[in-house]
Image (tube, rainbow, N blue to C red):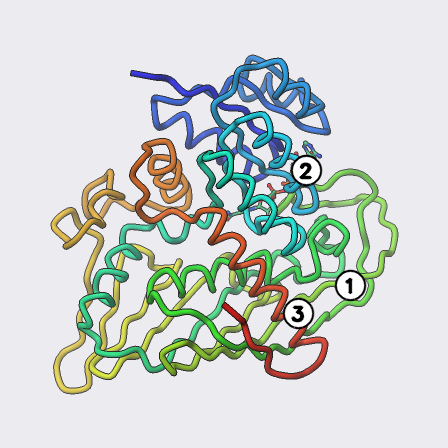
Amino acid sequence: MKKFKTGIVGAGFIGIAHIENLRRLGNVEVIALSDRFDAEKKAKNLYIEHAYENYQTMIKELDLDFIHICTPNNTHFEIAKFALENNINVILEKPMTFTVEEAEKLTKLAKDKKLINAVNFHNRLYPTNIHIKNILHSKEIGDVISISGAYLQDWLLFDTDYSWRLNSKESGLTRAVADIGSHWMDLVEYLTGLRITEVLAEFKTQYPKRKKPIGNVESFSKSIDQEYKEVEIDTEDIALLLFKFDNGAIGSSTISQMSAGNKNNLNIEISGTKASIKWSLKDLENIYLGYRDEANKVIPKDLSITGDAASAIDYPAGHTEGFPDAIKQVFKEVYNQPEIKHYATFSDGLRQMILCDKIYQSAKNRQWVKIEE
Ligand SMILES: NC(=O)c1ccc[n+]([C@@H]2O[C@H](COP(=O)([O-])OP(=O)(O)OC[C@H]3O[C@@H](n4cnc5c(N)ncnc54)[C@H](O)[C@@H]3O)[C@@H](O)[C@H]2O)c1
């Protein structure tokens, strides 16, 4: 069996999750890591043979099959472009790029080069979500009339909390929306097959200035007793979003990185003409179906569940498959070509870049903005 040779660019929070979950597949060897900071030390700690501070040298020197790009958003384009031009398959972290134009260029380049391309919208790959997609497709809940929900976190609650994401020069025009709102919107469009046609957004930036620790801060890490400098914040902490969908359904979502007590809480409720369906990251192994004139139902993740959701189940019912497992399932599908099943491609990544851009325009101009197809 062929063993793929893979290089990782960026070994922070999510880069390490990529390495761990690639290793679980068995047919992928993570042979190299590139990181701008402490590449040697990070590679040694992760038992990776080759370390590079410069991703170009890594790509030129090694005969890689895939690279995974796990760096801040403003670097995704140049790294992905260089990899694709060198005929390497690319898995990008979300948001796909810094601008819509960059995402368009990468989508075209990957298509012209016929290279495998993916964006890690891993929430699609929870088995319960694949099952929800099947239920919605079967019209068991009737026609979708409204969709509501939220993606709430609290790791940026205090003005001493800091991440590169807070700076639009690294993050892009939107922060909370691009960072976690894109997961919510990608999941809703994936599950329902509906397309968002119009958006209205209200943004709030609680702290116009934050205290940035002096030195490098990795995501979700806490900085205690450090020296700070005050920096201006030009991205949103919270976004309230309204949506119109192409079948006439309406929707709303609250996106916040300042909701105390919510560590990583994505939830969705889809109401149809016959029933409604609910899912949440806090209870990710159960699907809740609600009825008006019969008993409500809870469907657990189980190998006996219908459709192709079984392809994303590697452990029996009652044995939770969570965040790392969903990422593993994305990689399993991507490396197991030519079948394309559920994972998000560059086209899906571009779609989210367009939605984020329209949401930014809406918040800035305080009006509904249409999404042209
Ligand atoms: N799919 C998900 O659920 C998920 C979760 C977290 C982060 N992400 C995405 O992953 C990306 C990275 O986020 P993170 O939270 O891991 O950030 P992080 O700050 O924890 O790690 C980023 C790493 O990239 C390195 N780096 C920075 N610039 C570089 C460059 N030019 N070349 C090589 N290395 C470089 C940094 O030294 C650091 O090790 C972002 O795009 C983010 O949106 C996705």
Residue 232 place in picture, x, y as percent: 84, 60
**Front-lying residue, 218 or 274:** 274
Question: Percent position (x, y) of residue 3?
Answer: 37, 17
| Number of the front mark, 1 or 3 | 3
Label 3 environment density (alpha carbons within 10 Å; few <14, some 14–19, many ≥20):
many
Please report whichever mark, 2 or 3, sits nearer to the chain's N-terminal start: 2
Q: Are marks 1 and 3 in contact (CB under 8 Å)?
A: no
Residue type, mark 1 in image: Asp
The residue indicated by pointer 3 is 360
Residue 340 drawn above or below residue 204: above
Q: Earlier in the sequence, mark 1 or mark 3?
A: 1
Which quadrant of the figure contains the N terminus?
top left
Q: Residue furthest front?
A: 112
Spatial CA span between label 1 and label 3: 12 Å
The nearer-to-camera label among 2 and 3 is 2
The 10 Å Cα crowd at callout 1, few under 14, some 14 to 19, many 20 or more, is some
Res. 78 mark: 2
